[in-house]
Amino acid sequence: MNLSVSSVFPAGRETIFAKLQEIATLRYICAPIAKFTPLDERHIWAAGARFTFNLHVMGIGFGVHTIEVDEFDRERISTREHNKNVPVWNHIITLEEQSDGHTIYTDMVEVRAGWKTVFIWLWANVFYRHRQRKWRKLL
């Protein structure tokens, strides 16, 4: 199942892209719904990078979550993600700068988790709306 959530952020693409490169941003925008604890020493977000995290959702441990970065540039970020509960969590972020200095930020996610897919998809809708609210607060 696929979902797409978009917001207009009060910042330029460069500002948002710079924040996307910081692990602290991921942790902030996901809290308190999800907590990502890095298992890797390095955190340089770039195409070809692979990261692992301990994932907690609403305080419940969901094991190791892996993020493999396919694309990472100022217009589009694409990752293939998975964990023991969700074998396919493909995530694309697009950043479309507007003439007024704002940016349209879009999260597009493909979720495949067998019989759990519909439940994960419903949770993901809430989660990405939460993330975008936290982004607006951060900016």
Image: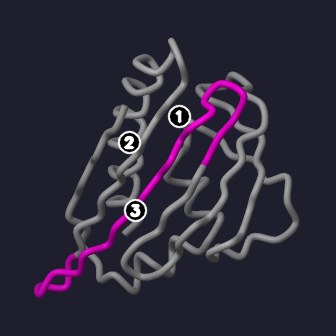
x then y, percent, for residue 133: 33, 50
x then y, percent, for residue 6: 24, 54
The residue sitting at 62% across, 64% down in the picture is 69
Viewer-nearest of discs 2 and 3? 3
Mark 3 is on which residue type? Ile
Look at the image and tell me in which quarter the C terminus lies: bottom left
Q: Indicate whether 12 appears above or below 89.
A: below
Please rate how many residues cluster around mark 2, counting C-alpha atoms within 10 Å: few if below 14, some from 14 to 19, many from 20.
some
Mark 2 is on which residue type? His
Please report whichever mark, 2 or 1, sits nearer to the chain's N-terminal start.
Answer: 1
Secondary structure of residue under mark 2: helix
Secondary structure of residue under mark 1: loop
Look at the image and tell me in which quarter the N terminus lies: top left
Range shown magenta:
81-102
Name the residue tied to disc 2. 130
Instruction: Indicate how the structure is coloured in the image.
Output: one colour
Mark 3 vs 1: CB contact within 8 A = no
Magenta span contains residue 64:
no
Report whether 75 appears left or right of 27: left
Viewer-nearest of discs 3 and 1? 3
Name the residue tied to disc 1. 33
Secondary structure of residue under mark 3: strand
x then y, percent, for residue 11: 29, 78
Report whether 119 appears left or right of 12: right
Q: Nearer the viewer, residue 136 or 21?
A: 21
